[in-house]
Image (cartoon, grey):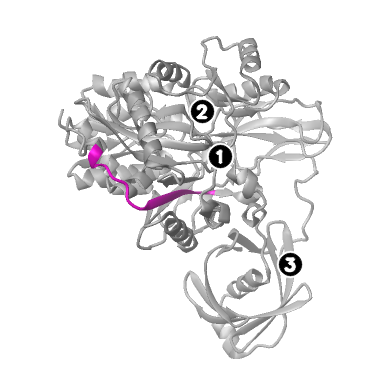
Amino acid sequence: MAFTKVLVANRGEIACRVMRSARALGYRTVAVYSEADANALHVQEADEAVCIGPAKVSDSYLRIDAILDACKKTGADAVHPGYGFLSENEQFAQACIDHGITFIGPTPEAIELMGSKRISKIRMIEAGVPCVPGYEGADQSDISFVNEAARIGFPVMVKASAGGGGRGMRLVDKGEDLLAALATARSEAQNAFGSSELIMEKAVIAPRHVEIQIFGDTLGNCVYLGERDCSIQRRHQKVVEEAPCPVMTPELREKMGKAAVAAAQSVNYVGAGTVEFLLDKDNHFYFLEMNTRLQVEHPVTELVTGQDLVEWQLRVANGEPLPLQQHEITLTGAAIEVRLYAEDPGANFLPQTGKVLRWQPANLPGVRIDHGMREAGEVSPHYDPMVAKVIAYGKTRTDAARLLARALDDTILLGVNHNKQFLANLLRHPVFVSGDTSTAFIEQHFSNDSSLKPALANSEALLVAAALFLHDLPAHFHTGLTGATPLILQCGETRTALRLMLGNQTLTAEINGTTSALTVQALQESTLHYEMDGVRRRVAFARDGNNLFLDLANGNLQITDVTQAPPATADSEGDGQLRAPMDGAVIDVLVAEGTTVTKGQTLIIMEAMKIEHQLKANRDGVVKTLSTSPKQQLKKRQLLLVIE
């Protein structure tokens, strides 16, 4: 059925990206938004927008009735679900159809079947698609998993049947760890996907994660558009995605492509889908799962094929045949994508929330940045902490990697910490550049990178900060003041005392017994141009009260002027106080007042940004006060309990 107005049942960068293609084809667009997203970019870019509820996703973006009501209010006759949220919810797809609304995606039957890792694996075995040995039985009892693990042999991988993104997934190396892994995987799966059903597979150690982009239409045609290598992962979540796969051959691509098409045709698949495989060192591949939606990493396929996959989705949903046949699809050059997250690599990638004081994506030929962030926006605790996808295209893989690292250097995100330097260093790592990567890459080759340590301010960063904390800097320099000015700056937990001398546009500072000098060339609204040791540089910055954010190596440095602050006292390490590391919600409290605990023991489980976090005791003792309970909403640094 022909449609004229597309409602995008999503938010952030994917909502903006879908609207871009819809507008290019002449469709009107509708955004939906939660109360927390009232000023979001995707709301501004749509022709019309409807608020569908409070910030919590279960009260807004997961409310089928509210989205259908938004369609009714605006006259939207088609819905694009994006990815995440309701994109793989067969009830949502069916509800759209029942209300005469075109669902831009596969049939509810295909979503339901492929949405279960357990059932889809059974169907793939029947279709002759290679699968990893494992257990996908209906009996979900602990004893069944224990018996099956003994049959399969350790190590095994426990997985949520209904989900993806690494949630509800646990690697188990030995039998005594299995029951605990099952319990946490079930809890995380239930919380993330509404289903605690699990499967178990033989762990394929250090494979490549290679996925095939497939596309089917309503006329029975189905093609594959090459592959993406998503091997570099952390906590089973993709970090780098690229096309083509560095070790792919034309013969292997055809073999995997045909297997993916067979998987799709076994469920009469329509629209964009991805069939994920594990590829071992001997080029044997095994079915992993099928995603019945557009993937986060679809831009790399678009860049190497020259095709707009959202346009393909819209055309197929309108009853048109696929734009190309298999023999017409070609791959040219190489593309690599990374995900820029608000998180702290120096604190085990703890998600970050808060105000974005400055957002300036790189502007380079061959670089594409998909994002939903306004210049001064916010990273909300209610949603995924991904800020943007940064993608680069080059004639060769080496060209693409080099350009992407430069694009990250040129992208400015200030106000919240992020993984920019982690990604740039990874792209420049010689093992990555060689293409010899696997799912174990970060653990094997990158675990000691400087970007994974807490970001500290060196003398240059402290001098830059000192220059910026002196508000009327040029006037001070021209007057030639000679008196020493004391300044105490804090970065992380480290406080540094500086003695400053001003004169002749140069700032001289004694820092930890060493004298350094910096000459200011120009001070603009958000950029400082300076010279130090004969080298001229520039640094982007943002101010928020006494807090200064600098876009320097090893991340978004936050430096605070604490000259007038009281002396530092011992913080949370070992003091018996357990505080929320970020905004979120309590899932479970494992102790009560009076409980004796040991250092490292898990006391509270909280959820933030779709991930469960175990909060542990920082000392031995007895729980003196407990001031939280399950389902409570938490603010960052909120005191939860005290151990004495």
Q: Amino acid at mark 3?
A: Thr
- Label 3 residue SS: strand
Q: Estimate the spatial distance between the alpha carbons at disc 3 and disc 1, rounded to whole Å.
A: 40 Å
Q: Estimate the spatial distance between the alpha carbons at disc 3 and disc 2, rounded to whole Å.
A: 43 Å
- Determine if the magenta segment contains residue 375: no
Residue 367 sits in which quadrant? bottom left
Q: Which one is closest to the eye, mark 3 or mark 2? A: 2
Q: Which residue is mark 2?
A: 192
Locate residue 390 relative to residue 305 in the image: left or right.
right
- Between 439 and 436, which is closer to the camera in this rendering? 436
Residue positioned 80% across, 43% down in the render = 575
- Between 308 and 193, which is closer to the camera in this rendering? 308
Q: Amino acid at mark 1?
A: Thr
Q: Which residue is mark 3?
A: 496
- Label 2 residue SS: helix
Give the position of the C terminus as an image quadrant: top right
Q: Estimate the spatial distance between the alpha carbons at disc 1 and disc 2, rounded to whole Å.
A: 23 Å
* Picture coordinates of residue 164, whole percent (x, y): 48, 30
Locate residue 173 relative to residue 607 in the image: left or right.
right
